[in-house]
Image: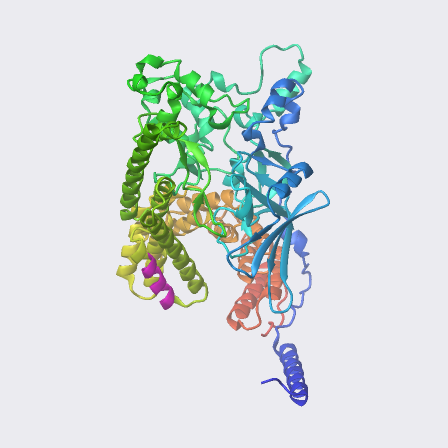
């Protein structure tokens, strides 16, 4: 019922009275400012928290970019600029924007009739907007495309900067379909402009950028080297360029890596940075250099399901090939020249590579094959497949695989020869060719159908959908379409159920969240994420044993997921079972080596085991990963203070206070204690003053402790006592 005018006035008066009363109460009860004693000096906050040694000035990157390489290698650079590697990240240019907007309408209408995305050119820039219809006027969110990923003629992903933070835009251009669609991982009918672009993503789409450690997506934009270019394989070029500028007559290349001189595993490591399952970092971003062991910088994912791996794991597939096992010198560059553009499929160069070891006559099937396909060796032994691990959600379809990749497990593939012969037969004329083509299509459809059924029985629904798409391509029978829709529907329902459960947790509707996670597991009993979240909720609900049983299943079903062990470690830590907790955190580190939070929590466990050195090591590692991790910094401050290492303790305390903008009274009190134990009482008293200014008014115990600390420090400093501040 609407408030009447007189009711409105009464409401305003009531609010005003409450506000005045609240202000009066605060003035009467708030703690008074501490009165400086004779001889006491107040230290300004900036001086109080300033590090003893100033931060070093930003260093110049050793990466110089491809234009510097062109000073001496102009012809090679010109050729390389046309490669997909170079174009895998780039700035938008007006001509390409015009081409995109000419190739498809500038509007992507989602399945939600109220929501559409608009792409338009504004000046020389491409603008992406989400437009949501409402009862009054449309709601619009727009961002300018400032960076592009993708050059292989499939998907083109757009990003934008917000200060030094890089975010992905929700709509991508899909070249094979010549239309716009949801970017991978985006749900149709939703708007999300806040997905951060993490460092591991940039490591495979750029040559170098300095990452702001401790952030999901903060970078130093001025040293971003776009594209995967020369220095990604040869190493940073500054020293090389400077040497040869000053030694123009030098013939031998200096201060640069020549990959061709490296051992095979070192050569493979260069490509494996991105073309393997090296997904988990062990160090900071962009620290690997050509010639080093990749294992020291990344942890390989253990799961081998191609539909769940983000990258194209060609290296692992190649290692399974007899060609690789029996050819000690075979590497990626045996078939690929990274300096020149490759045509579709790269068939010609690949066949030439095959012929280095294999005589055409050695093929046992050669004489039975039509003359026109006898030279298409790799189409049989390295067939093209659609990659189900990266799919797109369209307005009229879901989980659509568009990317085609060659199978790098060189060998005999059951369906490859049939696909090749089917293609050839369909290009011939005559009833006999048509009948044989129809028979081949039926046989292939049966194979793919059996494959899809087996995958669905293993709860691999997205992979099953990929197989059923092949069935429908060959035989669009309604029964086959039903199979495809069932696989897609189960995938859709599973993902929606997991999203609903997550939202319920955020809303603290935990009983309902437990029910939703159980529903997800009814669809997919091996879903590791659901087991982990359900296990945590059950433990919180007092059902400890049942919850722990679910948490233990996380690593069993996904050996790359650290969540289960991390949560088990924390549960045992809270129960003061430090030995068991330590074991779980060790296992969590195996799965997630570069995690600040895991190291911080493990440090707490080691401290509980009276291993102060172990705690210090873990907290130092935390701050290596996340330099502004205030909890680890103040933990180190307290640890080192107790050990009598006062100067170090003070520096970590300052860092913790700076990281929290001098607004955390507990951290400031710990810093004050470190100052006092180090004999710097004027700093200790000033830190307590700042702590009191930051302390909430509704915490009398905190105020009493801060007051007692101030009196203690004053006595230790030999200052005259005065009346204590009263809250």
User: Is residue 262 magenta-colored?
Assistant: no
Q: Residue at x 63, y 28 (%)?
A: 64
Q: Residue at x 66, y 24 (%)?
A: 68
Task: Tell me if I can see residue 53 in this picture.
Answer: no
User: Viewer-proximal residue, 568 or 474?
Assistant: 474
Left or right: residue 330 versus residue 56 is: left
Q: Residue at x 47, y 33 (%)?
A: 274
Q: Position of residue 256 (x, y in %)?
A: 56, 20
440, above or below 142, in the image:
above
Q: Residue 546's spot in the image, x, y percent?
A: 27, 60
Q: Quadrant of residue 435?
A: top left
Residue sitting at x 35%, y 12% = 359
**Residue reaching furthest to the bottom:** 6
Q: Is residue 185 visible?
A: yes
Left or right of residue 336: residue 90: right
Q: Quadrant of the N terminus?
A: bottom right
The x and y percentages for residue 44 are 68, 56
Q: Residue furthest front?
A: 431
User: Toward the viewer: 97 or 514?
Assistant: 97
> Which segment is the magenta one?
511-520
Q: Main secondary structure of the magenta part?
A: helix
Q: How many marks?
A: 0
Residue 720 picture location, percent across and down: 63, 66
Nearer to us in this view, 167 or 553: 167
Q: Is residue 443 left or right of residue 104?
A: left
Is the C terminus in the top left, top right, bottom left or bottom right quadrant?
bottom right
């Amino acid at each position: 019922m609407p408030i009447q005018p007189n009711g409105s006035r009464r409401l305003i008066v009531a609010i005003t009275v409450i506000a005045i009363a609240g202000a009066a109460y605060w003035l009467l009860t708030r703690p008074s400012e501490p009165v400086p004693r004779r001889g006491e000096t107040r230290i300004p906050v900036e001086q109080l928290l300033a590090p003893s040694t100033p931060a070093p000035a930003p260093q110049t990157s050793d990466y110089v970019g491809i234009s510097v390489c062109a000073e001496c290698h102009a012809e090679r650079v010109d050729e390389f600029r046309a490669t997909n590697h170079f174009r895998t990240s780039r700035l938008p240019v007006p001509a390409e924007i015009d081409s995109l907007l000419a190739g498809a309408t500038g509007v992507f209408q989602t399945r939600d009739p109220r929501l559409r995305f608009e792409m338009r050119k504004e000046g020389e820039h491409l603008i992406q907007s989400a437009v949501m219809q409402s009862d009054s006027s449309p709601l619009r969110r727009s961002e300018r495309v400032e960076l592009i990923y993708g050059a292989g003629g499939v998907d083109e992903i757009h990003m934008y900067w917000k200060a030094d933070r890089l975010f992905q835009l929700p709509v991508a251009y899909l070249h094979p379909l010549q239309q716009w669609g949801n970017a991978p991982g985006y749900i149709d009918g939703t708007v999300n402009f806040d997905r951060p672009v993490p460092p591991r993503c940039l490591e495979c789409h750029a040559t170098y950028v300095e990452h702001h450690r401790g952030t999901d997506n903060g970078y130093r934009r001025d040293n971003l080297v776009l594209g995967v270019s020369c220095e990604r394989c040869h190493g940073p070029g500054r020293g090389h360029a400077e040497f040869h500028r000053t030694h123009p007559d030098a013939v031998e290349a200096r201060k640069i890596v020549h990959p061709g001189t490296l051992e095979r595993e070192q050569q493979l490591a260069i490509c494996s940075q991105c073309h393997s399952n090296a997904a988990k970092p062990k160090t900071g971003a962009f620290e690997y250099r050509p010639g080093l062991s990749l294992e020291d910088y990344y942890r390989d994912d253990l799961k081998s399901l191609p539909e769940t791996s983000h990258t194209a794991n060609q290296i692992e597939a190649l290692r399974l090939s007899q060609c690789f096992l029996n050819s000690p010198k075979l590497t990626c560059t045996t078939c690929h020249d990274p300096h020149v553009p490759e045509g579709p499929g790269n068939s010609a160069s690949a066949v030439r590579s095959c012929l280095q070891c294999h005589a055409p006559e050695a093929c046992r099937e050669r004489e039975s094959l039509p003359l026109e396909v006898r030279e298409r060796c790799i189409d049989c032994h390295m067939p093209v497949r659609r990659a189900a691990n990266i799919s797109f959600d369209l307005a009229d379809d879901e989980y659509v695989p568009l990317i085609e990749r060659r199978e790098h497990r060189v060998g005999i593939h059951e369906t490859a020869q049939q696909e090749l012969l089917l293609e050839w037969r369909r290009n011939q004329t005559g009833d006999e060719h048509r009948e044989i083509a129809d028979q081949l299509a039926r046989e292939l459809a049966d194979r793919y159908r059996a494959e899809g059924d087996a995958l669905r029985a293993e709860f691999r629904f997205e992979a099953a959908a990929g197989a059923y798409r092949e069935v429908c391509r060959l035989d669009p029978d309604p029964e086959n379409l039903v199979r495809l829709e069932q696989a897609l529907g189960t995938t859709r329902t599973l993902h929606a159920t997991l999203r609903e459960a997550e939202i319920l947790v955020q809303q603290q509707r935990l009983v309902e969240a437990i029910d939703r996670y159980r529903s997800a597991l009814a669809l997919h009993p091996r879903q590791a994420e659901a087991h982990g979240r359900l296990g945590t909720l059950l433990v919180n609900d007092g059902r400890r044993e049942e919850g722990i049983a679910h948490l233990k299943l996380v690593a069993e079903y996904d050996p790359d997921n650290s969540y289960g062990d991390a949560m088990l470690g924390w549960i045992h830590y809270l129960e003061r079972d430090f030995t068991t907790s330590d074991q779980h955190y060790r296992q969590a580190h195996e799965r997630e080596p570069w995690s600040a939070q895991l190291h911080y929590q493990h440090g707490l466990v080691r401290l509980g085991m009276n291993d102060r050195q172990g705690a210090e090591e873990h907290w130092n590692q935390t701050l290596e990963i996340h330099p502004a991790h205030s909890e680890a910094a103040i933990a180190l401050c307290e640890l080192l203070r107790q050990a009598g290492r006062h100067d170090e303790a003070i520096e970590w305390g300052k860092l913790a206070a700076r990281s929290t903008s001098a607004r955390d009274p507990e951290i400031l009190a710990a810093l004050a204690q470190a100052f006092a134990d180090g004999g710097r009482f004027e700093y200790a008293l000033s830190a307590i003053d700042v702590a009191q200014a930051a302390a909430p008014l509704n915490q009398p115990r905190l105020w009493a402790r801060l007051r007692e600390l101030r009196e203690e420090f004053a006595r230790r400093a030999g200052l005259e006592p005065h009346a204590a501040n009263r809250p």
